Amino acid sequence: MTRVCLITSAATLGCLIASAAGEEPDLKAAITKLSVALEKNDKEAANKLIDELKKEDLEYVMELMKPPKSNKQAFDFTKEGIELKLTLMVKKPRDMNANAETYEKMANVLTAIAEYTKFKCPIEKPVGAKDPKDWAKWSADMKEGAKALGAAARAKDPKKVSIAAKKITGACVSCHEVFGP
């Protein structure tokens, strides 16, 4: 097992467990650390974490948004999983007082995933309907929506939560329609 250690703040040292002997890396921990670095606006730590995450398969990072029952690494702060919870939030966010903290956690994770995905476009030049510029736009839209979701959750504003969730899901659906799974 190889340990890759990164400084995530002046006082904290975080370690990612990298896959050396065929074991799975802890992507949930890595994305969580990236979300903390981004929240603190610690660009140096965020860049180091992204460089490590770039080595990981996009599919595995996307699986973190599935229901925790179906994936042991999925984020478990919502039983539905982030992906389904976002879809439900577009229609009607649940009680904001009880769920604001969960929505804010989701926003932080989604911001980190969006930051990571912008580097994972599977093509370098346009191929048919696939264009790296679209990939970049959808990653940016996802990140913008995630930041708006965090702000709406802190303000406990259900209408803005719904609008932000719609922006995020729109970016995801658009990207998946063109690039697949």
Image (spheres, rainbow, N blue to C red):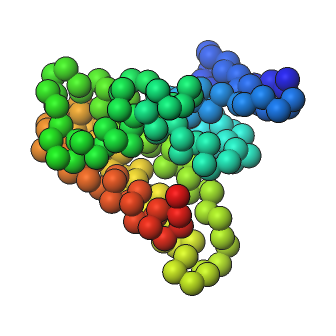
Q: Nearer the viewer, residue 102 or 85?
A: 85
Instruction: Locate residue 73, reporting x and y percent.
Output: 56, 28
Instruction: Name the residue located 35 percent from the left edge and 27 percent from the top edge.
Output: 78
Instruction: Locate residue 180, reporting x and y percent.
Output: 53, 64
Quarter-of-image position of residue 23: top right
Q: Nearer the viewer, residue 7 or 77?
A: 77
Determine the residue located farthest toward the front in the rendered image. 70
Instruction: Locate residue 52, reporting x and y percent.
Output: 72, 40
Determine the residue located farthest toward the top in the rendered image. 11
Determine the residue located farthest toward the bottom in the rendered image. 128
- Can residue 27 be seen here? The reply is yes
What is the total number of numbered labels drawn onto the structure image? 0
Instruction: Locate residue 16, reporting x and y percent.
Output: 70, 26
Q: In the rendered view of the protein, which quadrant contains the N terminus?
A: top right
- Can residue 33 be seen here? The reply is no
Quarter-of-image position of residue 95: top left
Instruction: Name the residue located 39 percent from the left edge and 60 percent from the top edge.
Output: 173
- Asked if residue 7 lies left or right of residue 148, the reply is right
Q: Nearer the viewer, residue 36 or 31?
A: 31
Quarter-of-image position of residue 42: top right
Please tell me whether residue 96 is drawn above or below residue 115 in the rendered image: above
- Asked if residue 87 lies left or right of residue 47, the reply is left
- Asked if residue 34 lies left or right of residue 166, the reply is right
Instruction: Name the residue located 36 percent from the left edge and 26 percent from the top edge.
Output: 79
- Asked if residue 13 lies left or right of residue 86, the reply is right
Q: Nearer the viewer, residue 10 or 46?
A: 46
Please tell me whether residue 75 is drawn above or below residue 90 in the rendered image: above
